[in-house]
Amino acid sequence: MKVLFIQNNGIQESIGVANLSGILKANGHETDLLLVSHTPDLIGAIRAYDPGLIAFSALTGVHHSIEHLAIRIKRELDIPIIIGGPHPTYSPDIVLHPAVDIICRGEGELAMLELADTMERGGDITRIRNLHVKTADGAVHRNDLRPPVPLDELPFADRDLYYAKYAFLRDMPMKRFISSMGCPYPCTFCHEPVIRDMYRKDTKSDYLRRKSVARAVAEIKDIADRYPLKHVHFSDDLFFIRNNYTWLEEFAEVYPKAVGIPWNCNIRYDSVNQHAADLMEKAMCYGAAVGLESGNQEIREVVIRKKSKNEHIVEGARLLREKGIKVLTTNMIGLPGETLDNAFETVELNMVLKSDYVRANTFLLFPGLPLVEYSRQKGYVDKDFDIDRQVAQSQEITLKTPYAREFRNIASLFWIMVKCPPSWIPFFKRLVKLPDNILFRVVGSFNMVQELLFYRVRPIPALRYFHNTVLMTGRSGLTMTMRTIPSLFRRNPRASAATREIYEAGRGYF
């Protein structure tokens, strides 16, 4: 059977889509992928490939653009359409959209394989686990989740799906890999505890899994042997957790000899002790993205349930600094109940940590987050607040706060403020009270330069990437890329984790 994946932006390859293509090809099916931005005649290209199934991956906030594409395709072609990814996982009623035939909740590898196998032989697809299937009479068959698959049992991700056609992705010197799935922590601003609970309830199994060191290293070596690769980014929610360093110990022995390419990852400060820092250095780690979220310990521990003590954060930062490991901290401004002084505590803690790079974003709620209900209960949003409709229409949700303007300005000026001495804080407190203006926005846009530096993306690849992800989209695509996507990244660091890392990389979704 022929399956066609359609991606409505060219931001980066989706590891989730590549995983799906890998398992489909390994079992005799054909796959191809079209980037809408690089396909002038989309309907003609679909017709020429003649697929039996069209698949989209949808993240909340831009899923409406996929709905529009699905309507356009259905108007011209009678081909079944399936949508997977985070949006249908947490908002499964998208299956009721007239142009959508099937949605996939949670992990898609085994569900997509069973779907392709069943469709090829003309069987009944309404009972396939993880899928919600709409029949011709409008009835929807909603099936339970299947247990998560051990990661080592899956074929390698099919990155050729992207690299054979799109050189700007193939030639990027930094590429993303995943060595584990899930996160054990209960943070209320993140979807990870939600999907973990979904799997525990429906499958009585643990969503948290890790590849063997041999498997993780083999995947990287496979790409390094065939494509440009100078820096590796591990997109795991957490590359290691506190007091559990066995995997990291083996990795530090194997990776430098087998691969020997510098890498960065996502960690927590309170997971870093002297042993962990030594292992990271030995394994050739050059950078770590660390979720600080808030400098106020009460907000961090009570509101967002991230149990990190300030003293552990400061100690972890010191250990990384001594090893020469560059740190990018992610910070949220405008959390439920946060005051202006609380927000500046976040600025001041970054000063103490001597953060090399920072990402600061005003807080954004997404459907399914535990923090949504907390915000309703505390009156930070209305009881009847329709989060699905608001996210889809505005891309930004503003909690009830008297500091909305100040929070936006703090997020824009954050990277400059943390480089200044603490004595400048009174000046910045006056500065952020000014009306939102183009100068502050321009300053804020340079946050992306810090990310390029952190990920070691040099000017030429960056310009090539910009040309293909912004200029190639045309006027309407440019508007979406410059306004919609950055607004998600800029306003929520966990939207970065949820969009850039989970939503786009497709960890556990497609």
Image (cartoon, rainbow, N blue to C red):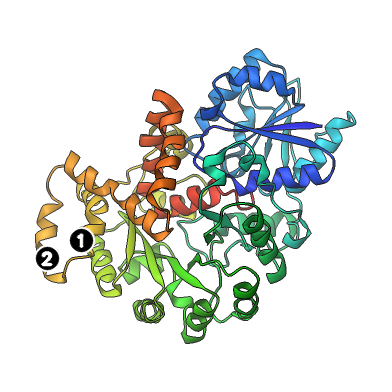
Q: Amino acid at mark 1?
A: Met
- Does residue 388 show up? yes
| Crowdedness near tag 2: few (<14), some (14–19) or many (≥20) residues, C-alpha within 10 Å | few
Q: Nearer the viewer, residue 109 or 327?
A: 327
Indicate the position of residue 352 as horizontal and vertical percent values: 26, 74
Q: Amino acid at mark 2?
A: Trp
Dots 2, 1 in contact, CB < 8 A: yes
| Crowdedness near tag 1: few (<14), some (14–19) or many (≥20) residues, C-alpha within 10 Å | many
Task: Give above or below for 243 relative to 202.
Answer: below
Q: Earlier in the sequence, mark 2 or mark 1?
A: 1
Q: Quadrant of residue 121?
A: top right
Q: Quadrant of residue 293?
A: bottom left
Helix, strand or loop status at disc 2: helix
The quadrant of the image that shows the C terminus is: top right
Per the image, the residue denoted by label 2 is 424
Task: Give above or below for 188 relative to 162.
Answer: below
Helix, strand or loop status at disc 1: helix
Give the spatial CA distance, label 2 vs label 1.
8 Å
Indicate which disc residue 369 carries: none
Q: Nearer the viewer, residue 486 or 407?
A: 486
Q: Residue at x 63, y 75 (%)?
A: 257
Indicate which disc residue 417 carries: 1
Task: Give above or below for 202 relative to 314.
Answer: above
